[in-house]
Amino acid sequence: MEAYLLDWVNLLLRWVHVITAVAWIGSSFYFVLLDNSLSPPENEDLKAKGVDGEMWAVHGGGFYHSNKYMVAPRWRPLPENLHWSYWESYSTWLTGFALFTVLYLFNAGSFLVDKSVHDWSAGAAIGAALGFLVAFWVVYDLICRAFGQRKNGDLIVGAGVFAFIVFASWLACQLFAGRAAFLLVGAMIATAMSANVFFWIIPGQRTVIAQLRAGQSPDPIHGQRGKQRSVHNTYFTLPVIIAMLSNHYGWLYQGANNWLVLVLLMLAGALIRHSFVARHKAHVLGKRAPWEHAIAGTVVLVGMAIWMAPKPPSAEQVAAAQALAARPAGYAEVRAVLDQRCVLCHNANVQQKNVALHTPELLKQHAQAVYQQVAVLKLMPLNNATQITDAERELIKRWFERGAPVN
């Protein structure tokens, strides 16, 4: 019953997390598009009102006219009813952290720890995982504050943050199970994104509004810093998404150089995102869209596909596979593998993911899931904790293709 309830919590948290993430990312993408699509107003009335940029858009059968004031409207007092975009960010982080707690921290011994990678206790792994979230924000924030306002500050900050992400990716893959490491790197970047909103963007906006309402000239540093952190967030978005998605694909995180795989995936996402950001500004200026960055990101992905492609089997491997195929793949053989490799976590007393395999009837019921998770995706056993072999996976594959007999 406990596993069943946890599955419901998992489902509902994941659902809410995706919904709030869509809302946050959608708002971020839209405002970046808007800022980079603004052009100086041509109408004298707009100029007199203090409009600094405008954009016309068509959507849903109507026209939209967006105006941006860098400070405040000249033609009317600052409205009391202002829309704030921050609950999307906070809700995304809170639901994401709750999901991380339910899936990884609550089962740290199974999900965070892979003793073949680093042999340590579940408690130590939990502490280190939480430390990753905090440490990345602290280092990232220090880099931004130390170099963000200097000459070529954006370039220096970008290089420094990229270097630290590379280091953090490498370190995570030396300490945690591959799947957890990929997710954790995405989570630490997402934490910095939400912290940008919480510690800098929203407080800066509140300070500016308070100064305007008091009749004071706002300090421009708040707008500059908020804009800088907002731009960082939009570049972080695609790397975070691919880090979150990639942990579902065992062939990405199970290799010896999994940290490099993760870094290249995130780099490709950032390059592709840059092309879309720069495209909006190029459109306003009447220049060609700078697709070369997206092309570079695509080349990185294609190069990874070639690099990671399975090598053709040798003659010895072909012979071994043929000999293996000649072996029986009946219920007795599969039952021996399951009892040794799978039933430890899928039995009458423990039913991970609400799956039990200790009887022929239950195995028949879950045969499709066993085939997918063990033979196709190769995600189970988790972190290969029971050391199932490729030959045993192949045995389960042939058993299922024979109709999954249980007698």
Image (tube, helix red, strand yellow):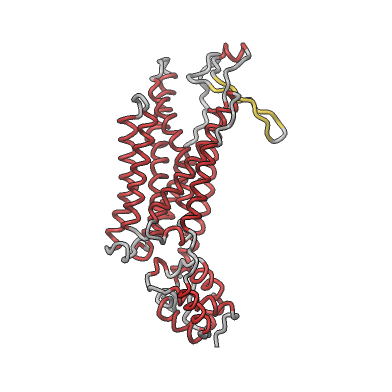
Q: How far from the left and from the top, in percent, is residue 263? A: 41, 48
Q: Is residue 407 above or below residue 82?
A: below
Q: How far from the left and from the top, in percent, is residue 155? A: 39, 31
Q: Nearer the viewer, residue 165 or 46?
A: 165
Specify the quadrant of the image occupied by residue 289.
top right
Which residue: 47% across, 78% down?
Answer: 320
Q: Is residue 344 above or below residue 77?
A: below
The total number of labels drawn is: 0
Which residue: 36% across, 50% down?
Answer: 169
Horizontal relation, residue 176 to residue 293: left or right: left
Which residue: 36% across, 33% down?
Answer: 157
Q: How far from the left and from the top, in percent, is residue 222? A: 39, 25
Horizontal relation, residue 286 to residue 203: left or right: right
Q: Is residue 194 above or below residue 326?
A: above
Q: Is residue 354 above or below residue 97?
A: below
Specify the quadrant of the image occupied by residue 230.
top left
Q: How far from the left and from the top, in percent, is residue 42? A: 62, 15
Quadrant containing the C terminus is bottom right
Q: Seen from this angle, which residue lies furthest right?
A: 61
Q: Nearer the viewer, residue 304 or 350?
A: 304
